[in-house]
Image (cartoon, rainbow, N blue to C red):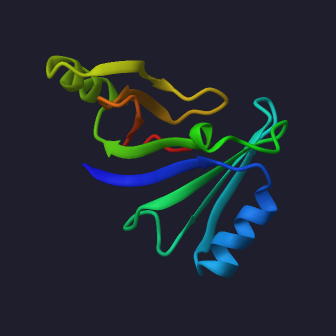
Amino acid sequence: MRLLHTMIRVGNLDRSIGFYTDVLGMKLLRRKDYPEGRFTNVFVGYGDEREHAVLELTHNWDTTQYDLGTGYGHVAVEVDDAAQACNRVRERGGKVTREAGPMKHGTTVIAFVEDPDGYKIEFIQRGSMG
């Protein structure tokens, strides 16, 4: 397993991209709009996603501001098989909040679990990112 990305919700995508790229010196790695879901995902980081953990900036088109408590999204971890990873979490007494399956408005196989404090951890199945 390896850490893939951390997602945060942003109210103004252009301003956030400018901060992470111009102020912090990250590179804009990829961007994808999801018109059916009315959101955009942008990935920024210091290196290629195949070797480095990055940040996912999610802009929900109809939201311009978040309270800090709702701005945090999740930490993503790449796994070989999302369903098996969920089973391992359950077997160890953990909580699965979304079973493995394709993401809404996409094809990437994902699942979500919660840590003891309620923070979301996303499992992304290796080879399924689309």
Q: Residue at x 47, y 74 (%)?
A: 47
The spot of residue 122 in percent (x, y) is 42, 36
Task: Work out whether 16 lies above or below 27.
Answer: above
The spot of residue 105 in percent (x, y) is 67, 29
Q: Residue at x 59, y 81 (%)?
A: 25
Residue 114, located in which quarter of the rendered image?
Answer: top left
The spot of residue 67 in percent (x, y) is 67, 41
Which quarter of the image is occupied by the C terminus? top right
For the image shown, how many numbered marks are present on the structure? 0
Residue 52, located in which quarter of the rendered image?
Answer: bottom left
Side of 25 where 75 appears, left or right: left
Q: Residue at x 58, y 75 (%)?
A: 26
The spot of residue 125 in percent (x, y) is 38, 38
Between residues 96 and 35, which one lies in front from this camera angle? Answer: 96
Q: Residue at x 26, y 29 (%)?
A: 85
Between residues 27 and 107, which one lies in front from this camera angle? Answer: 27
Task: Work out whether 98 lies above or below 54.
Answer: above
View extreme (left): residue: 92
Side of 2 where 68 appears, left or right: right
Residue 44, located in which quarter of the rendered image?
Answer: bottom right
Side of 100 where 87 appears, left or right: left
